Image (tube, coloured by chain):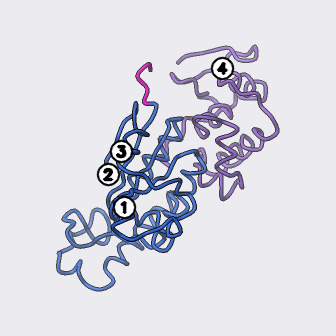
Chain colours: A purple, B blue
């Protein structure tokens, strides 16, 4: 299993760079993961990351686009603006959760 | 990853539920991967973007030998029974329920999602003329009516997928 150092802390990831152990995640790690995607985290990003975190703890999966819209009240346009070219995948990675396994 | 797909142009040519959804799922999935997506609706596929009908698209229960009841691993549905009134509505209802559970949006919402995601929605000029349609008949997400020549121009440099 690959290990890499983010924000001065070693973390375990899968081959695509998703954290495999969410207990190793914290806000500094999130900022470092975001930087890898060329993203500087703002309050808007945190609204998305916080929703993913809460929803994952409840459902055990990363929410899809529709759930982000309907339950998280985060519009599709906002998600694409905040996390360009792959909103759900990027947001999932930055929030320290696995790669989304849904088609929609 | 140097040969990553950068653009897909998807032709939706069929007007049944199972004719329209694959194109929408592929188009939305492309945007989710950062791939540019054009959706071109032609012939009966056009019903997927007609304001008045897009919310009531149905599954065909006749002429589909793979159709089984009451679920995907049930008994084959004989053609004659598939023709009974209400069968198509019933099968559509069942499938919509399954899709709702998977958070796959209804067609109008899905079109809006794809458009908000930056996907482009186009209608085929030949069909528009043949069906005597105007822009007012389409949902607001339709960007333009295109000739097939316009379509090829837009699709240049990317992949074309016909559904």
- Please state which of the two labelled residues, at mark 4 or mark 1, is closer to the viewer: 1
| Residue at mark 3: chain | B
Element type where label 2 sits in the image:
loop
Is the residue under label 2 in contact with that under label 1 (CB below 8 Å)?
Answer: yes
Residue B83, by quadrant, is bottom left
Is the residue under label 4 in contact with that under label 3 (CB below 8 Å)?
Answer: no
- Please state which of the two labelled residues, at mark 2 or mark 3, is closer to the viewer: 3
Where is residue A23 drawn, in percent x and y? 69, 30
Q: Name the residue carrying label 1.
A: B45
Which residue is at the front of the view, B158 or A31? B158
Answer with mark 2 or mark 3, whichever residue precedes in sequence.
3
Q: Residue at x 46, y 61 (%)?
A: B99
Residue B85 shown in magenta: no
Q: CA distance from mark 4 to mark 1?
A: 48 Å
Q: Name the residue carrying label 3.
A: B149
Note whether A41 is above or below B19 in the view shown: above
Answer with mark 1 or mark 2, whichever residue precedes in sequence.
1
Query: Magenta residues?
Result: B1-5
The answer to whether B81 appears left or right of B38 in the picture is left
Where is residue B91 drawn, in percent x and y? 35, 73
Q: CA distance from mark 1 to mark 3?
A: 19 Å
């Amino acid at each position: 299993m690959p290990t890499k150092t983010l924000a001065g802390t070693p973390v375990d990831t899968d081959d695509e760079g998703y954290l495999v152990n969410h207990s190793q995640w914290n806000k500094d790690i999130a900022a470092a993961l975001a930087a890898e995607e060329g993203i500087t985290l703002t309050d808007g990003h945190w609204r998305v990351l916080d929703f993913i975190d809460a929803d994952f703890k409840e459902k055990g999966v990363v929410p899809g686009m529709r759930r982000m819209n309907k339950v998280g009240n985060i519009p599709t346009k906002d998600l694409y603006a905040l996390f360009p070219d792959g909103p759900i995948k990027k947001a999932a990675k930055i929030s320290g959760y696995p790669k989304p396994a849904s088609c929609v | 990853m140097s040969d990553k797909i950068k653009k897909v142009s998807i032709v939706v040519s069929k007007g049944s539920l199972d004719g329209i959804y694959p194109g929408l799922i592929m188009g939305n999935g492309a945007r989710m991967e950062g791939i540019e997506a054009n959706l071109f609706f032609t012939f009966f596929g056009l019903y997927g973007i007609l304001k008045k009908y897009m919310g009531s698209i149905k599954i065909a229960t006749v002429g589909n030998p793979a159709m089984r009841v009451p679920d995907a691993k049930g008994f084959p549905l004989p053609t004659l029974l598939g023709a009974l009134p209400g069968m198509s509505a019933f099968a559509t209802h069942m499938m919509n329920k399954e899709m709702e559970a998977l958070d796959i949006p209804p067609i109008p919402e899905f079109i809006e999602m794809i458009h908000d995601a930056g996907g482009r929605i186009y209608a085929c000029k030949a069909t528009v003329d043949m069906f005597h349609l105007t822009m007012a008949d389409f949902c607001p997400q339709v960007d333009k009516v295109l000739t097939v020549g316009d379509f090829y121009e837009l699709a240049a440099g990317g992949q074309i997928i016909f559904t």
